[in-house]
Every structure is written in structure tokens, then in C-alpha cells.
Image: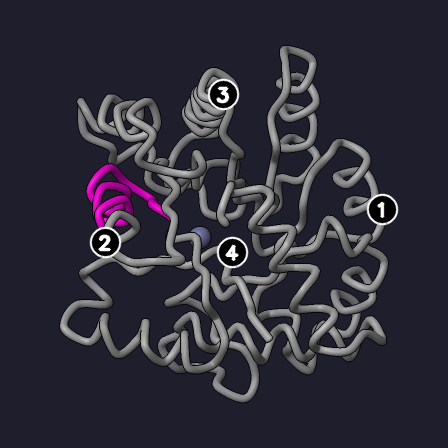
Amino acid sequence: MELYDSHCHLDPMRFGADMPDVLARARAAGVTRLTVIGTRAADSEAAAELAAREPGIVAAAGIHPNDVAEAEPGEWDRIVRLVEAGRVAAVGETGLDWYRTTASPDLQREFFDRHLRLAQRAARPVVIHTRDSIRDTLDMLREALGRGLVTPVLHSFTGTAAEAAEAVDLGCHLGFAGMVTFRSSAALREVAKGVPLDRLLVETDSPFLAPEPLRGKRNEPANVVHTARCLALARGETLEAFAAATTANACRIFGVA
Ligand SMILES: [Zn+2]
């Protein structure tokens, strides 16, 4: 059985000296492939370097919506360079966050639009963060899709069944993270049940929000097994079938062999 952690942050600030152990634990757990996601220029570059030297790892480059107000001049150009040089498999993480308004909605929209256009120009998938903003996120995506093709991934999905259905209709893939394993997340497990298997991804969003039974600890890619097991059980699928399908989906989206 092989699993693909489709969204993790392994920046050197939080994963320094023990990075080899973290990767070894992932592989030992069957988590053979990872997409490492950037939130600023520096961690996007670090992700690209990790991807260049480690098998089974690809990177995404972007500026997180919570960070766009702090982005320094020149950071966007570094993101563009990573994408245009073919050093990353995806654009992001980008999106809209109306819950944490560390950056103004206008600035978040401007950066989301830039990321979408870059993804379209470079023919790369785009990794999207949406929090309390699904309506505006889907509206901007619909507009972008009118301009041309893009493959959107809504990561750490927490919306309703109706929102999931609308996103799937738009061509989105939906990633589910550790939150879906929490006892209080019965409604979210119901939503995950309704997502077509060929649109489903599983992720840790490491180092954040570790799944049950590891809640509260620093999260790492090996833990995606717990989220996969919970989702497979909720959907009435075997873990093996769930792992095979979600791994195939992520390989297809991110262009991984
Ligand atoms: Zn993230």
C-alpha cells in the first residue's frame, strides 16, 4: 500500500535536523510521495531544493493568503522564477481567507488572481486555501476557468456537501486533512463520503492539526495514514482501495510517476 501526502509544509524552521527521520518515518508508513507546499518565497525555494534531491517529493510555490501583506518586494518574482524554471509541480498555496484578515480582502484577491494566471500560463495545478471564503473562492475560480484551463485543488476542505458538489462540478479536487478524523467532525466525514473517488486527495497539512490519535502534536507526513484510514472507513472502502485511488489522483495532478 502506498499513500500520497498531497499537502505538507516541511520548512527548515520546523523540520530541521530531524528531516531525514521525518522522511524515513513517512516511507516506513507507506507514504512514498509528498507535495511540499510553500507559503513564502524562502520556503517555496526550500521545497524545490528538497524535491530536487529526494525521490517521491515535488514542490509547490506560492505566497499564502495570510502572508501576502508581509511579502517583501521581489518575493513574487522569486515564485514566478521557480514556476517558470520548472522547479515546482504546482502553484500555491494561494487563495482567500476571510477568517484571518491579516491581509486585506483586496490584496488577497489580487494575489489569488496572480497565482491563478501564473498557473494557467505555466500549465500547472493550483493549490488553494479557502477559509470562510468558499463563495468568493469558487466565483474567482469560475472566472479563471473562463479564461482557460487550470486544475484546482481545494486543500483541507471543510465546506458543506453543496459546496463540495459545486467545487467538483467546477473541476476541483478536494483534499481532506486531519480535522476530518476529529470526533466533532461527523458532518465533514459525511461531506467526504459524497466526493467522487477520482476527485479525492488526502493530506496532513503538516506541521498543523495532527489527526486523531495524535492530536496536539507536531504533525508529519507519516500521519496521513490515520486520515486515510478514517476516510476509507467513513466511505465504506478498504484502506488499500482508498490509498490506490487517492495516490493515483495526486500523481496525475502533480505529474508524479
Ligand atoms: Zn497549507
Q: Earlier in the sequence, mark 3 or mark 2?
A: 2
- The reply to whether the residue tagged 4 has its Cβ within 8 angstroms of ligand 1 is no
What residue is pinned by disc 4? 6
SS class, disc 1: helix
Quarter in which the N terminus is drawn: bottom right
Q: Going by the picture, which residue comes out furthest to the front?
A: 257
What residue is pinned by disc 1? 162
Q: Earlier in the sequence, mark 3 or mark 1?
A: 3
- The circle on residue 53 is 2
The amino acid sitting under disc 2 is Arg
* Magenta extent: 37-49
Of badges 3 and 2, nearer the viewer stands 2
What residue is pinned by disc 3? 113
- 67 w.r.t. 30: above or below: above
Crowding at dot 1, Cα within 10 Å, few <14 / some 14-19 / many 20+, comes out as few
The amino acid sitting under disc 1 is Ala
Q: Earlier in the sequence, mark 4 or mark 3?
A: 4
Of badges 4 and 3, nearer the viewer stands 4
SS class, disc 3: helix
Residues at circles 4 and 1 in contact by the CB criterion of under 8 Å? no
What separation in Å lies between label 3 and label 2 (alpha carbons)? Answer: 31 Å
Which residue corresponds to the image point at 36% horizontal and 46% vertical from the top-left? 59
